[in-house]
Image (tube, coloured by chain):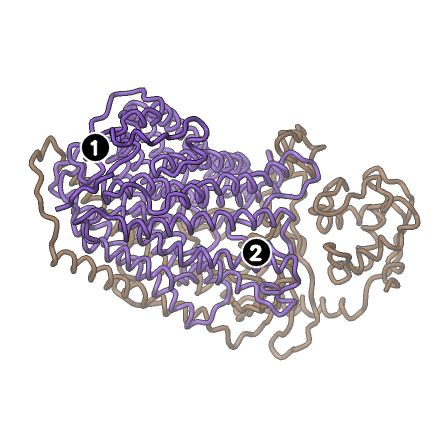
Amino acid sequence: MSTAAATHDDHHDHHHAPTGLKRWLFSTNHKDIGTLYLWFSFAMFLAGGFMAMVIRAELLEPGMQFVDPEFFNQMTTVHGLIMVFGAVMPATVGLANWMIPLMIGAPDMALPRMNNWSFWILPFAFTILIGSVLMSAFGDGNPSAPNFGWTFYAPLSTKYGPDSTDLFILSVHMMGISSIMGAINVVVTVFNMRAPGMTLMKMPLFVWTWLITAFLLIAVIPVLAGAVTMMLTDRHFGTSFFDAAGGGDPVLFQHVFWFFGHPEVYIMILPSFGIVSAIIPAFARKPLFGYASMVYATASIALLSFVVWAHHMFTVGMPLAGTLFFMYMTMLISVPTGVKVFNWVATMWRGSMSFELPMKWAIAFVVLFTCGGLSGLMLAITPVDFQYHDTYFVVAHFHYVLVTGAIFSIFAAAYYWLPKWSGVMPNKTLGELHFWNSLISANLLFFPMHFVGLAGMPRRYADYALQFADYNFWISIGGFWFGLSQLLFLAVAVLCAMKKGEKAAAKPWDGAEGLEWEVPSPAPFHTYDTPPVVK
Amino acid sequence: MQSTLFHRAAVGLTSLMISGMTFASDWTERSELDLRPGVTQVSQDIQDLHTTVLWIVTVIGLLVFGLIVYSMIRHRRAKNPNPSSFHENVFLEVLWTVIPFVILIAMAVPATRVLVQIDDSAESELTVKVTGYRWKWSYEYLTYEDDNDIGVSFFSNLATPPEQYNNPVLAGGLFPYGTAKELVGKEAPEKDHNYQLEVDNKLIIPSGQKVRFLVTSDDVIHSFWIPDFGGKKDAIPGFVNEMWALVPEGKEGTYYGQCAELCGKNHAFMPIAVEVVTQDEFKTWVAEEKEKAASGPDLTPFTGLDQAMEEGKQTYASACALCHGANGEGGIGLPFAGTDFATKPEYLNEHIDVLVNGRAAMPAFKAQLTPRQIAAVVTYERNAFGNDTGDLIQPADVNDHE
């Protein structure tokens, strides 16, 4: 993309884009900021992945071999936080930055300076978070890093939290500010900057799903901010929001957290629905089936996400009526989700499919996300959830929707749009190796977790009873394999960034539709100075 | 849970598939791939419900994946070069909205029935208060049949010795190994059959009677879970949650469970072991325990330092080692090895006081340990790990301590 400036239109000669470090630090260009977001999220994916490797090394065999249980808890906690807030969310924001203006024919995001700020907060937020881990790991006698799980339940995180909890609170606040600003930017851009003729119901589904995601973010991130602020005052200013001894309520914490936390799950997966809805029609060479019902299904999922939060809390001792309400509402979510899956299958039906890399990832997404959705339906059945809750069955479920769901779709997006971003085709051999290794190892990693969970192994365990040993061994092998496989993508991405590879046409996929394919590859630094007309 | 067509079909199909394969009743023998059916009616109802739902989602999944695979084969470009262009079908779209809805109702009906049944904890014969501590459980017997004043309570600690789970292969470096540095490279002893599951004092309950557990916590949130009884309940400070179990007669034996809510460092080290005995045995046991409780603490003096050290070593391993380290090197708790606190005579009284009454993060142990155990453990801490004070503390010294 460094050569992008060379392809400037003539009338832009007065514009002197900074070069080198300044180009990235001061950038207000949606493409550069999108690129920053994507590289950052991949770096975080590797960092969080390394922590997963520590977890799997410790669980390879029963007994404590590599780390002490305290450090193990820090790993599970920070792994979760980094993957949710550092890998998946910034990756989808990066995609939104790059693609939304191109897809709706806008010259840039509506609020470019805020765009710069919302990215540059993130490296500092994660330096603070990861710094607490490094201090704990390398400084003998330093306080432990956050060790209360990514869900940071009170009072484990308040009265019993390590000193580094305050660093955690600060960094979560910063991530939240970044997310809210990113979301506002998307909403303003989509509502104000569409090209003439681009009505709402003509927008690509990726734009739709991101618009709905942005509203979810604006609605729930302040709730998260409220939760961590109450923690802060409980810890230092004598309040007792979550402390029963002072008249507070530890369960209140869980209600507040999951009122954020459940919509958060959809914040991570809705953009994926949009990605897959772009890729499957392109490679089936057939229009998306049920466009309108896709939009309505996405909106229904988003609305329902506000009334299901307590399904994460079935065992806290809610009244029967409350439990039943949350069970029914949770089961209901499978209806719009099912509509989406059926629509994707119907899009493939009687198409003329070819299986280039983006399509491979997209189909793997549909199948494996459906597995995660179906185990989600099982978890919704409250009496059975009393057995599944807090076991590896839950771990299997959410890794199916987040790794083979969200992350697989992000890889699909990367392979699909890398030609547009970089101007070269991603290396096919490395890409194929990356896909097949990831597909097989992810299933070796996550599928046996269902069994070990049903057999009764609780999650967040640093050590386990002997009857769980053989499964854990294979899960760990799958984990190391999956982790190493991701380095192949690093090679793919670096090759693209270095412009090594087959040159990409403006529209490298013959079945692809949308405005983004009408600009050259790589996309020039400035696009759509004059808006295109959409018929 | 007798009922729906779905349920009967699912159970029939499953029993056909697993005929000849028996589920082990011993927790340590894992049921290979499926949810454990357990021993209570509730756990078996849950298992049936699980089986029903598992079959439904399996059929749906196979149907969807079958269509995808069929389409990938038949509708690939080589086979079908000219794609169709249909992109709407109101009938289909209504159909695949309505059918899942109907299936959901079919699942919700039996689920509701089981849930209502689980919620009914009335008419129990035994009530036990279960309290979670970091990282142990305590059981207090409140009422049994007509007896409202049992007054029997005890703590239950992990019995797996630390040598079995501390098997470090790296010395310090990137990973702060903390409590087990001295064990690096040492050969680990063979792990017991009930590794990480065995406890020193089991919860004892009668078979054939409904037992109600009142679940709460003293510090952070824990979760009380015995898989074979069906379901778990969170132990939350400031809350008292209810759950119940009725183990049928003829199913006496030991059942294991583990804490299911992250509660800090030793979350994986606070198992639950329940011994289900016949009602006669239970009554005898309760009578014995009541007698012991009534006769006051055992204040017989130790015969010598060796006896106190021997008993202190056992108590230290189960009650102290998790925080203070197997070799007194400290961890979450302060170290003992070579410290002023554990070696200087002026701290002796304070040493006893901290154990009896607690201080800051250190809990009070007077409810958890007998005076004899506290005396033994103080003696041990002052004479082990290289400490050599020669102090011998007697049970009466502790009992007199306010």
Q: Which chain is brown?
A: B
Which of the 4 image quarters holds residue B324?
A: top right
Q: Name the side, left or right, on which B236 lies relative to A527.
A: right
The x and y percentages for residue B64 are 22, 47
Please tell me which residue lies in front, B224 or B2: B224
Count the labels in the image.
Answer: 2
For mark 2, what is the residue?
B254
Query: Which type of secondary structure does the marked residue at label 1 adopt?
Result: loop
The x and y percentages for residue A361 are 28, 36
Please tell me which residue lies in front, A430 or B46: A430
Q: Is there a contact, CB below 8 Å, between mark 1 and mark 2?
A: no
> The numbered mark 2 sits on a residue in which chain?
B
On the question of residue A387 being in view, the answer is: yes
Q: Name the side, left or right, on which A160 lies relative to A527.
A: right
What's the residue at 86%, 59% (across, down)? B398
The x and y percentages for residue A68 are 62, 39
For mark 1, what is the residue?
A355
Q: Which chain is purple?
A: A
Q: Name the side, left or right, on which A200 lies relative to A368.
A: left
**Which three-letter amino acid code belongs to the residue tagged 2?**
Thr
The x and y percentages for residue B378 are 83, 50
In the displayed image of the protein, which residue is found farthest to the bottom? B146
Q: Residues within 10 Å of mark 1 (few under 14, many from 20)?
A: some
Which of the 4 image quarters holds residue B10?
A: bottom left
> The numbered mark 1 sits on a residue in which chain?
A
Quadrant that contains the N terminus of chain A: top left
What's the residue at 52%, 77% (across, down)? B123
Please tell me which residue lies in front, A112 or B188: A112
